[in-house]
Image (cartoon, rainbow, N blue to C red):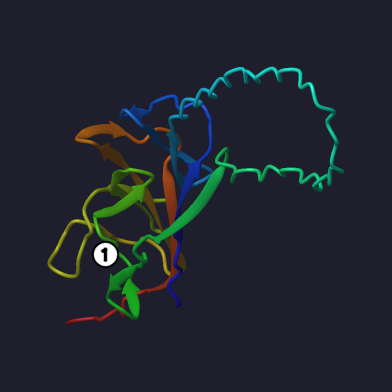
Amino acid sequence: MGIKRYALSLFLLLAPMPLANASCTDKTCVDVFTDQNQLVITAQKGAAKPTPKATKKPVVRPVAKPVAKPVIKKPVVKKPIVKKVSVPKPSTASLSDKLIKLLPSGDINFQPATESVVNIPTYFWTQTPERFQAVVPILDVIVYVNLYSTLTWSFGDGAEQTTLLRGGPFPNPAVTHAYKTKGEKRVSLKVTWQGTWTVNGVTSPIVGNLITQSISRNLQVVSAPTLFIN
């Protein structure tokens, strides 16, 4: 069976918006939360103060004295009027960017690898790591994201097990299950991610719904052959 890959989206929003659980410096406020199975990182930079305009001084023109001799006026050639066109400055009201980080690929493994036997424990494990860490530079700060995973196994016959352990092949007993009936079973694994984020040495929990991955694989369970001994 193929292994599915799931993406964890880190959305970096650099737009004015209220930050409910933000960590702020002198220049930037940052917040991290989950929304629609994605990790969202928001940052808001403080607005610069407007620069006061310089006040123009009144121009004092000298008064011409009367001249006794007649004044012959020379023709005045008027220069063309050139209007100054103001070029608008680049807008800094809204900037946005998106950074996508791939979560580690989840998988399901079991032993025996081909067919399990009724009433004999089957050993399960996954290579999904316990933790996922990311370092995200945004504006003038660095955000450290630290997630850890919880595993929920569904064995295809109604039985479930939730654990932090990865399990393993024989003789690791962390995740095992004995089937009571034969047939094809649909084994599912749900990986749930949650954690914290840190900026400028301050650590806060990531609020919102948890981020989840779902993986499944078929398992064939057979009956053990009957052996008669005299």
- Vertically, is 171 above or below 72? below
Is 76 situated above or below 175?
above
Identify whether 153 is placed above or below 217: above
Circle 1 SS class: strand
Q: Quadrant of residue 132?
A: bottom left
Estimate the x, y position of residue 129 in percent, counting from the top left: 25, 60
Say few, some or many: other residues with alpha carbon within 10 Å of mark 1 (under 14 / 14 to 19 / 20 or more): many
- Point 19% across, 70% down: residue: 169
Residue 65 relative to residue 175: left or right: right
- Residue under label 1, please give it: 125
Looking at the image, residue 148 sits to the left or right of residue 70; the answer is left
The residue nearer to you, when weighing 134 against 4, is 134
Residue 217: % across, % down: 44, 69
Closer to the camera in the image, 49 or 59: 59
Residue 157 shows in this picture: no
Camera-nearest residue between 190 and 147 = 147
> Is any atom of residue 122 visible in this view?
yes
Residue visible at 51% across and 26% down? Answer: 50
**Residue 196 place in picture, x, y as percent:** 29, 39
Q: Nearer the viewer, residue 147 or 121?
A: 147
Outermost residue, front side: 69
